[in-house]
Image (spheres, grey):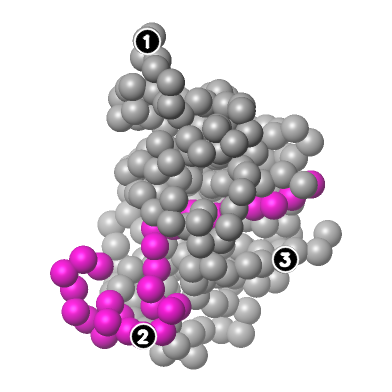
Amino acid sequence: MMGCHCKVCTSTDPKDNRLRTSVLIEVNNKRILIDTGPDLRMQMLREKVDDIDAIIYTHEHNDHIVGLDEIRPYNFLHKKPMDIYLSEQVEAALRQRFHYVFGEKNYPGLPEVTLHRITNIPFFIEDIKCIPIQLYHYHLPVFGFRIGDFTYITDANVLPDEEKHKIAGTKVLVINALRKEKHISHFNLEEAIALVRELKPDIAYFTHISHQMGLYEAVEKTLPPNMHLAFDGLVLRIDN
C-alpha cells in the first residue's frame, strides 16, 4: 500500500507484492478476462497476454473497471471491438466514467467495445457457458462467475443460500478474503474458510488480500491443506 512500511509492504517475498485483483481464464481456445483494474496494463505485459476475446465485469467499483481504457492495444492489433459482458448497473457506471468512449462523436484511438447485458441467468460467450452467481458487497449487488469447474468470487461478504447450488461440484474456488479481522463488505479469512468447508471444492484460493492479512508464508502455514492464499502470476490448470 502506498505510504505504508509494514512488514508486508516491505517484504522481499514476491508473493507479498500484490496488484489489484482480476483473473484471465483460458478455455476452448478463448481468453476471458474478469475485471479490468487499474493495474491491467502492467499485468498483461507481465504475463505476455497478446489477445483477449471477452471481458466480464463483477461490479462497478474503480479497482475493478478503471483499466478499461487499456484495452486499446487489443483493438489496434486485432482490428475488432472488445466484447464486454456486464450488468445494467455496471454499464451505467462505465458510461458515466468513460463517457468519451460512448459519446456520439468518437475520435480515432478510443477503446472500441460491444456491450452485452447480463442478468442472473447463464449466458454464453460463443460456446462457453458462464453462470453468474448473485452476491452482495455489503448492500451492493455483485456477480461471481462459474465457468466449467472454476468458480470466481471477489468483493463480497454475502452469498445467499439460494445461490450456493451453482457452486456445487466445482473443482477450484477462488474467493475473496480481505484480512483476518471482520470487514463491512468483504469476507474475512475465517468467513472464507467456513464457506469453503461448506461448499466443498477440491481446492480453494483466497484472493483480494490486503496487507492486513499478514505475510504470505506465515498465513499459508495456518491454512487447511486444500486452501491457499493466491498470489500474482498464479496459474491453475483444471482437467475436465
Residue located at (59% from left, 53% from top): 49
Name which of mark 3 and mark 2 comes first in the sequence.
2
Marks 3, 2: nearer the viewer = 2
Residue 120 in sight from this viewpoint: no
Please state which of the two labelled residues, at mark 3 or mark 1, is closer to the viewer.
1
Question: SS of the residue at dot 2?
Answer: loop
User: Which quadrant would residue 239 be assigned to in this image?
Assistant: bottom right
Residue found 70% across the figure and 59% down from its top: 170
Q: Nearer the viewer, residue 39 or 202?
A: 39
Disc on the earlier residue, 1 or 2: 2
- Residue holding disc 2: 12
For the record, the magenta segment spans: 1-28
Q: Which mark is residue 105?
A: 1
Looking at the rendered structure, the kind of residue marked 3 is Arg
Residue ID at (63%, 33%): 78
Mark 1 to mark 2 CA distance (whole Å):
48 Å
Mark 3 element type? loop
